[in-house]
Amino acid sequence: MTKWVYGFGGGSADGDASMKNLLGGKGANLAEMSSLGLPVPPGFTITTEVCTWYYANGETYPADLETQVQAALAQVEGVVGKTFGDAANPLLVSVRSGARASMPGMMDTVLNLGLNDQTVEGLAALSGDRRFAFDSYRRFITMYSNVVLGIGHDQFEEILDDHKDRLGVVIDTDLTAENWEKVVADYKALVEQELGKPFPQDPKDQLWGAVGAVFESWMNDRAKFYRRMHDIPESWGTAVNVQSMVFGNMGETSATGVAFTRNPSTGENKLYGEFLINAQGEDVVAGIRTPQSLTRAGREEMGETALSMEEAMPTVFSQFVDVTGRLEGHYRDMQDIEFTVEQGRLWMLQTRNGKRTAKSALKIAVDLAHEGVISHDEAVSRVEPAALDQLLHPTLDPNAARTVVAAGLPASPGAATGKVVFDADEAERLGQQGDAVILVREETSPEDIHGMHAARGIVTARGGMTSHAAVVARGMGRPCVSGAGEISINEKAGTFIARGRVFKAGEVITIDGGKGEVLDGAVAMIEPELTGDFQTLMAWADEVRRLKVRANAETPLDARTARGFGAEGIGLCRTEHMFFDDTRIAAVREMILADDEQGRRAALAKIAPFQKSDFVELFTIMSGLPVTVRLLDPPLHEFIPHSDADIDALAAGSGLDAEKLKRRARELHETNPMLGHRGCRLGVAYPEIYEMQVRAILEAALEVKAASGVAPIPEIMHPLVALGLEMKYLRDLTDRTAEAVFGEAGDRVEYLVGTMVELPRAALRAADLAEHAEFFSFGTNDLTQTTFGISRDDSGRFLQAYLDKGIFENDPFVRLDQNGVGDLIRIAEERGRTVKPGMKMGICGEHGGDPSSIAFCEEVGLDYVSCSPYRVPIARLAAAQAALSARSGVEREKDR
Ligand code: ADP
Ligand code: MG
Ligand code: MG
């Protein structure tokens, strides 16, 4: 018999923290906390396997599920001493979703389930607090209607607002028992009117309704979007946790809150969090009331007057501090914790490894290693490489003038400039157009996720440091200012007012998420300084890394940036970029128009000095490090205009013959340029072009060697080779030219000759190529194009349909297709090294900066990856993690 239900609470549990796949993160950790003897309200978890079963079997349940749920419920009733559905002594429960990876705000929780017209009276009598009982009942009706019955929140809010207006009351806690009873009556009437039947009164129906809703929510749009964004497979499914209720809304000695054992923005080792007295569950994160700080230090720092938990509830606070310390020690990582105090008694409702900014992830990993809690290697594996991106980008220049238009909370660090947008859909639309936008909202909810993703930054007028906006923005690495109360938004008019100034949609603002400020206009930014924890962690990463990391760079600026980020050479210098420069394009066109070899040579002689000086600069910057130079690759017609009008304009300006240009343009026209006269096919047809380039490279190397005493190591790379004889021809051409250069100079430098492997035939016949090549560089952009037969430039039209239908799991141009393209790389590696053992091999496509593709390169045994300069640190860390998991033989559990 399959065990579908796992109990927890009362000092023991059926499951533990290692069972996340089966119990979901929340369920596994509730079980673990119970076994640790922490105060956890008893409950049970319905496994993720039931979710999978549910979808595999036409949305039905396994036959024995109901019996198992009943048994687990009876167990809980025994521990708590209450009975589900009992009119005098009712057990109430929460129904909570919980997947393997935390999906904050993705699926909603129902609290106070089990209440109906009878049990609410029992709760009132038992607690001696009628107000509390009806407050709980109205919360339950709202949540259940919203999550299970599909009736929107706002209709309930309208009813409540009407009541408050009529009573002249502003905050919810001022409503009396009688007031809440009337609200409840109106709520029930609303449900009946909407559904044509009354609000479900049978607690069993309520329970199964909520369980079904959790499973259903696994497939809602928000959840799907979140999964896609975070790479979470649909097949995982969610668990359902049913847990006995504890009440933070039982008066002044009750409270509910959230805490981080360290600061999730900065990583500082101080308990950090918020709580609300006399409140329940989501009140803290929903931004409806402004929460108070947990600690006195926190309160003082924020300049708040309302007492902190430390001051208002000192006894239970110190007990809580003990528990948080134990949890962090136990999990050996920063914890994100939910708790409730019911009449002075502490209850733990959730713990998990806390989401954090890149800055804080670095600090926490390095600190934990220094504290001796984790090893250096573990610290290296704790930081998500892609998250480093947040640190590699500019922040506001502290010396730039700034006009603060509103102050709020520093909810997620970093700076961003963009146009004001009030609506998530609009943010997405403009974002796709390439516009930088700042999403400005009263507060955010899970419906806004796509807009937050598309925005450069987020501002909310309401909500605290743990509001939805703050948590999600930190997770996404978007700068965010939350709770900017000075902003008053008029969404209909498309404006907001702050400090007396009106801002329209489309106006440019800047936000400083580290300070919590909204600024007028665009503000100057500065490059990040990568010192301290960043350097420490990178040094630890470099110790375990096997793969070398190079950069794709051709300009001096890119080369310098790359070195600054720790690149160990250039893996791809594309020479055609150098041809487009204003100072040389004229000579390039002259070469293209030339009628014969002599004419071409004359034009090339004009380009040569420019090429040489480019390489001198590059070799000087990369002093002593290898530089792979790819000879001319694109078809020649890319260098001349195409339309007659453009050609006429060019001819008029340059004195070139317009008719001749047009004729040449027609001659060079190709139906399929990607597969046309490009790559080494240029070098075979016009060897003088490649000769000029080889000469420029080697003369530059000699010059730098003479000037600096450090000999550069040029690696001359021939693109688009498919045949062994092609490679031999190019190799001979290169060596012959080199010998001529060395003879003239009376000096030599070392150089390598190799090819970019970007055609399936090249990979398959790698042994033929290896006879004449000293290195392979896998050009995985073109190799992906040529393997799939998909043009990168045209794939946009249909790729989305493939992604939507799940035929492609990822865009193969972003994440290497490890099966197909991967096979070709494996074959080329093996066949190449059979001929030339230890042959140098690397990868230089976009994939060189993608962590999962880097792991593949480690596995295949390549020597280096090469990526864009800003991704170099990401690649260094990813390469270190790949080496660590290769060493341990197990794949590192990804922190999603
Ligand atoms: P989420 O994943 O969105 O955080 P949760 O299931 O953790 O959803 O619950 C939402 C809120 O309800 C949290 O504040 C949580 O602490 C509270 N909550 C959940 N279960 C209970 C319970 N049994 N008693 C009291 N509060 C609860
Ligand atoms: Mg929730
Ligand atoms: Mg939670």
Image: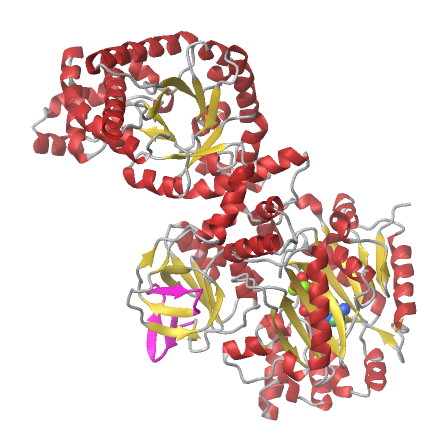
Residue 697 vs residue 655, the one in the foreground: 697
**Residue at 61% across / 55% down in the picture?**
368
Magenta-drawn stretch contains 506: yes
Where residue 408 appears, as percent x and y from the top left, is 45, 73
Please state the quadrant of the image where ligand 2 appears: bottom right
Q: Is residue 110 visible?
A: no
Where residue 865 appears, as percent x and y from the top left, is 47, 32
Where residue 622 appears, as percent x and y from the top left, is 33, 34
Residue 426 vs residue 284, the one in the foreground: 284
Q: How many marks?
A: 0
**Residue at 37% across / 40% down in the picture?**
562
Magenta-drawn stretch contains 96: no
Q: How is the image coloured?
A: secondary structure
Residue 572 figure quarter: top left
Eyeballing the image, is 65 above or below 462? above
Q: Is residue 815 visible?
A: yes
**Residue at 19% across / 23% down in the picture?**
608
Question: What is the magenta range?
Answer: 492-516
Eyeballing the image, is 805 above or below 245? above
- The quarter of the picture where the N terminus appears is top right
Please indicate whether residue 458 sits to the left or right of residue 471 in the image.
left
Please indicate whether residue 462 sits to the left or right of residue 154 in the image.
left
Residue 177 figure quarter: bottom right
Residue 432 vs residue 260, the one in the foreground: 260
Where residue 709 appears, as percent x and y from the top left, is 28, 28
Residue 570 vs residue 652, the one in the foreground: 570
Give the residue furthest to the front: 709
Please indicate whether residue 683 sits to the left or right of residue 197 in the image.
left
